[in-house]
Image (tube, rainbow, N blue to C red):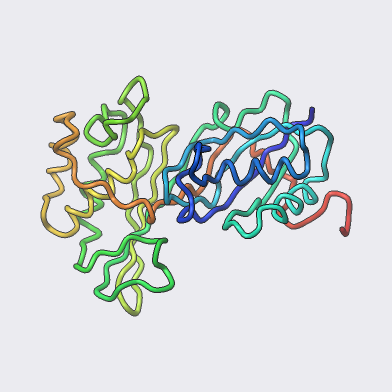
């Protein structure tokens, strides 16, 4: 059975996370239902990571086995047709090795968190960014973020429900970008690591927002990290600002498969 990798974009607001639920809508179920429309024998998909309820993705990767070979373009087109009207899109598809695994072969996961400082409520961006009504200091947040880089026991910054056997992770990047807007300021937190703990990125951002607003000093982040106590963490930032931006592999599974172009010529 040929195996395909899928690059997936979704707006997480209507879903209770990636993982299939018994009675609640999930991204995984929507895609698996679409797969069954084109391959009634399909056994489902496996993703590079499970996003929580309300979290978005621009570069989720999953793999699936199909009963027959498909042209990559036509596979994406067929799935996108059956995914309507869900806010989910297959932005690329590619055949991969039979032993390719979207999760276990991943070398790095890249997340972005969007936060906006502005007094007015959100309209067009509601559900896609966290709004705070007060000013924030990018420099202070970056100084606090720097204490989190490297290999640490991140017990302070993981959910008490986290099932990972170890709280030790290596954080490769936590960069705070400031984007001036006409009606406020957007901050984007760019985060890279091989793997993350449950709620780790949102715990980082919630804590750094306290630093940016002046409630915490940057050095307080280091102190909180070293206590290894969840109860000293800042608040967990809301899910609507978090995006799974990219999953990286030793070899890009989509190299040579340009989104929007058929391998068989004009459709």
* Residue 184 percent location from the top left of the image: 30, 74
Outermost residue, front side = 23
**Image quadrant where one finds the C terminus:** bottom right
Outermost residue, bottom side = 182
Q: Is residue 44 left or right of residue 191?
A: right
Viewer-side residue, 20 vs 258: 20
* Residue 152 percent location from the top left of the image: 27, 28
Q: In this view, does 138 lie to the left or right of 232?
A: right
**Image quadrant where one finds the N terminus:** top right
Residue 106 vs 129, above or below: the answer is above
Q: Is residue 247 left or right of residue 53?
A: right
Viewer-side residue, 50 vs 39: 39
Residue 157 vs 140, above or below: the answer is above
At x 30%, y 73%, the residue is 121
Residue 85 vs 264, above or below: the answer is below
Residue 209, picture quadrant? bottom left
Q: Is residue 164 left or right of residue 216?
A: right
Number of numbered markers: 0
Residue 151 vs 241, above or below: the answer is above
At x 71%, y 42%, the residue is 35
Viewer-side residue, 138 vs 16: 16
* Residue 116 percent location from the top left of the image: 31, 65
* Residue 24 percent location from the top left of the image: 48, 44
């Amino acid at each position: 059975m040929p195996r395909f990798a899928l690059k997936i974009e979704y707006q997480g607001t209507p879903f209770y996370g990636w993982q299939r639920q018994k009675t609640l809508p999930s991204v995984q179920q929507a895609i698996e239902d679409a797969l069954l429309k084109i391959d009634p024998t399909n056994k489902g998909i496996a993703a590079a990571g499970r996003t929580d309820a309300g979290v978005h993705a621009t570069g989720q990767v999953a793999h699936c086995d199909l009963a027959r070979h498909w042209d990559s373009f036509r596979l994406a087109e067929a799935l996108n047709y059956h995914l309507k009207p869900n806010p989910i899109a297959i932005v690329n598809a590619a055949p991969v090795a039979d032993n390719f695994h979207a999760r276990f072969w991943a070398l790095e996961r890249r997340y972005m968190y969007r936060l906006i400082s502005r007094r007015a409520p959100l309209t067009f961006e509601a559900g896609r960014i966290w709004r705070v009504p007060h000013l924030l200091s990018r420099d202070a947040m970056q100084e606090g973020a720097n204490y989190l880089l490297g290999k640490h026991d991140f017990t302070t910054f993981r959910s008490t429900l986290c099932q990972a056997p170890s709280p030790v992770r290596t954080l490769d990047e936590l960069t705070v970008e400031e984007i001036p807007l006409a009606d406020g300021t957007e901050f984007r937190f760019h985060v890279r690591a091989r793997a993350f703990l449950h709620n780790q990125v949102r715990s980082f951002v919630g804590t750094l927002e306290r630093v940016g607003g002046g409630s915490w000093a940057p050095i307080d982040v280091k102190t909180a990290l070293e206590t290894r106590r969840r109860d000293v963490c800042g608040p967990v930032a809301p899910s609507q600002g978090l995006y799974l931006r990219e999953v990286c592999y030793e070899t890009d599974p989509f190299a040579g498969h340009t989104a929007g172009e058929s391998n068989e010529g004009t459709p």
